[in-house]
Image: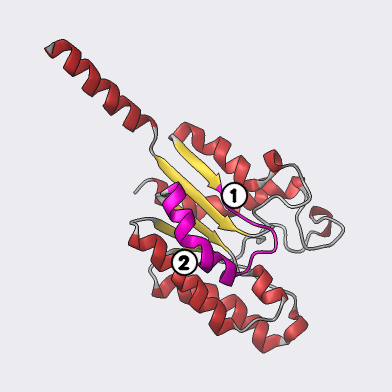
């Protein structure tokens, strides 16, 4: 009987050890592999890389999503997936639509606080937009991600497309969505700040 109990405890411990945690990627079309195969998107590539770290990666990104939509559904996502780390990559669609920066910051803050309330570590992934709405808006938009991440004590990636921004050949014909070839570069941009969170 004792031997059976010890075996059961060891099995339970091994099962718990096998799953180090869950990473939830919470973004828009840039993270949802828009226009390319899902398996080739940077989030799927992250999932393959993290298999050796015993992490599960869940992609809850939705094409066209704004921070308002993300804030509305974050509770359900956290309840369903119970992530240890949340990669927050929303905001690009807010900028393309010229939505108020203050509103975007409030939505991002709501998402981060909800995740942190459940003891999840958060990585904020920033975005840049074309200067369609003027220099002031463009600069305030970009700075918003850093401001929110600092205030909420979250990790921060300044720009998801940092390694491909000026390389037109790495974008699909719409010049907004990256190609398959760009996905590994996007992964490396996120990985620099994500890796330390995995080790905590």
Above or below: residue 129 compared with residue 134:
above
Crowd around label 1: few <14 · some 14–19 · many ≥20 (10 Å) = some
**Residue 173: x and y, percent?**
87, 58
**Residue 88: x and y, percent?**
52, 61
Above or below: residue 155 compared with residue 10:
below
**Residue 200: x and y, percent?**
34, 49
Q: Which residue is nearer to you in this view: 181 or 104?
A: 104
Residue 72 is inside the magenta segment = yes
Question: Residue at the right extreme?
Answer: 173
Residue 94 is inside the magenta segment = no
For the residues labelled 2 and 1, the Cα–Cα distance comes to: 24 Å
Above or below: residue 38 compared with residue 107:
above
Q: Secondary structure at mark 1?
A: helix
Residue at the (47%, 57%) spot, across then down: 76
- Front of the two marks 2 and 1: 2
Q: Can the viewer see residue 123?
A: no
Residue at the (70%, 42%) spot, across then down: 38
Q: Main secondary structure of the magenta part?
A: helix
Nearer-N-terminus badge (2/1): 2
Range shown magenta: 59-81
Crowd around label 2: few <14 · some 14–19 · many ≥20 (10 Å) = many
Residue at the (51%, 56%) spot, across then down: 87
Q: Can the viewer see residue 3?
A: yes
Q: Which residue is nearer to you in this view: 28 or 177?
A: 28
Q: Which residue is mark 1?
A: 188
Q: Which residue is mark 2?
A: 111
Residue 9 shows which numbered tag? none
């Amino acid at each position: 009987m004792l031997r059976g109990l010890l075996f059961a405890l060891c099995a339970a411990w091994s099962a718990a050890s096998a799953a180090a945690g869950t990473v939830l990627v919470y973004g828009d079309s840039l993270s949802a592999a828009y226009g390319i195969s899902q398996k080739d998107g940077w989030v799927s590539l992250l999932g393959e890389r993290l298999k050796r770290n015993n992490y599960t990666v869940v992609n809850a990104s939705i094409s066209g999503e704004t921070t308002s939509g993300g804030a509305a559904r974050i509770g359900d996502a956290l309840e369903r997936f119970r992530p240890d780390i949340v990669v927050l990559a929303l905001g690009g669609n807010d900028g393309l639509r010229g939505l108020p920066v203050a509103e975007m910051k409030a939505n991002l803050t709501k998402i981060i606080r909800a995740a942190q309330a459940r003891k999840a570590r958060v990585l904020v992934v920033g975005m840049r937009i074309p200067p369609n709405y003027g220099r002031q808006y463009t600069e305030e938009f970009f700075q918003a991600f850093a401001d929110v991440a600092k205030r909420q004590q979250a990790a921060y990636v300044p720009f998801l497309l940092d390694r491909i921004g000026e390389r037109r050949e790495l974008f699909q014909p719409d010049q907004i969505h990256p190609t398959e070839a760009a996905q590994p570069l996007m992964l490396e941009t996120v990985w620099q700040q994500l890796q330390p969170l995995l080790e905590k």
